[in-house]
Image (tube, rainbow, N blue to C red):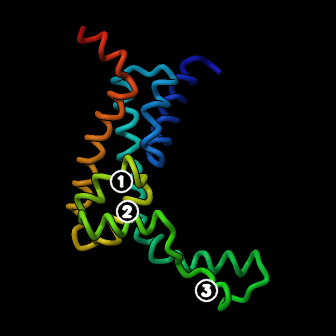
Amino acid sequence: MGSHTLEIGKYVGITLLSSVKFLFSPFAARGLHLTFLESILSTTAGGILGILVFGLIGELISDKWSVIVAFFLSVFTSRTKIEAIRHSKRKFKPMTRFIVKVKRRLGLFGLAFLTPCLISIPFGAIACMSFFSHRRKDAFIYLFLSLTFWTLVLNAGAHWKELFHMFR
């Protein structure tokens, strides 16, 4: 395996990490010795990929989640389909409560703003599309603007020494 393949693997890895765990990706990029610009490009590409994938298919997953869980519970356990459907009903966990609280207090903009850093792109994109399906275009715009902001902030934090020496 050549060094060129390993370099491409770094970018692909950071891009995939950014699509699901955006908060950690600039620091992982720094750990892989990517430059500030390479880190910005990789994390932004991953964030956009995550928003598009989870935003577009997230509504389908969200709508069919209890059916999907019920199917797997009935196949892999001794429960009947009816018992599995009852068991698969959504339970409010701390993250779900947090998302609902943000949605009620801050609306679409607040939910989109907190998605890359606190909520995570998969949950945040699905929540934005589920709660604000009538404002899909706005949701995507807010998510992309938020992603841009957090990309700059987190990458600047991860590469602060490099940036400090550049502007010195």
Question: Which label's residue is closer to the chain start, 1 or 2?
Answer: 2
Regarding mark 3 in the picture, which secondary structure is present there? helix
Q: CA distance from mark 3 to mark 2?
A: 25 Å
Question: In the image, is residue 144 above or below residue 163?
Answer: below
Question: Which label's residue is closer to the chain start, 3 or 1?
Answer: 3
159 on left or right of 134: right
Q: Check the picture and name the quadrant holding the C terminus.
A: top left
Residue nearest the observer in this picture, 111 or 136: 111
Q: Position of residue 147 (x, y in %)?
A: 30, 45
Q: Residue at x 46, y 36 (%)?
A: 25
Q: Position of residue 45 (x, y in %)?
A: 37, 39
User: How many labels, in total?
Assistant: 3
In the image, farthest residue toward the bottom: 82
Name the amino acid type tagged 1. Thr
Q: Residue at x 27, y 41 (%)?
A: 148
Regarding mark 2 in the picture, which secondary structure is present there? helix
Regarding mark 1 in the picture, which secondary structure is present there? helix
Question: In the image, is residue 25 above or below residue 162?
Answer: below
Identify the mark at residue 56; answer none if there is no mark: 2
Within 10 Å of disc 3 (Cα), the crowding (few <14, some 14-19, many 20+) is some
Q: Position of residue 163 (x, y in %)?
A: 30, 17
Q: Residue at x 32, y 37 (%)?
A: 151
Q: CA distance from mark 1 to mark 2?
A: 16 Å
Read off the residue under disc 3. 85
Read off the residue under disc 1. 115
Marks 1/2 in contact by CB < 8 Å: the verdict is no
Marks 3/2 in contact by CB < 8 Å: the verdict is no
Q: CA distance from mark 3 to mark 1?
A: 30 Å
Front: mark 1 or 2: 1
Q: Check the picture and name the quadrant holding the N terminus.
A: top right
Name the amino acid type tagged 2. Leu
Front: mark 3 or 1: 1
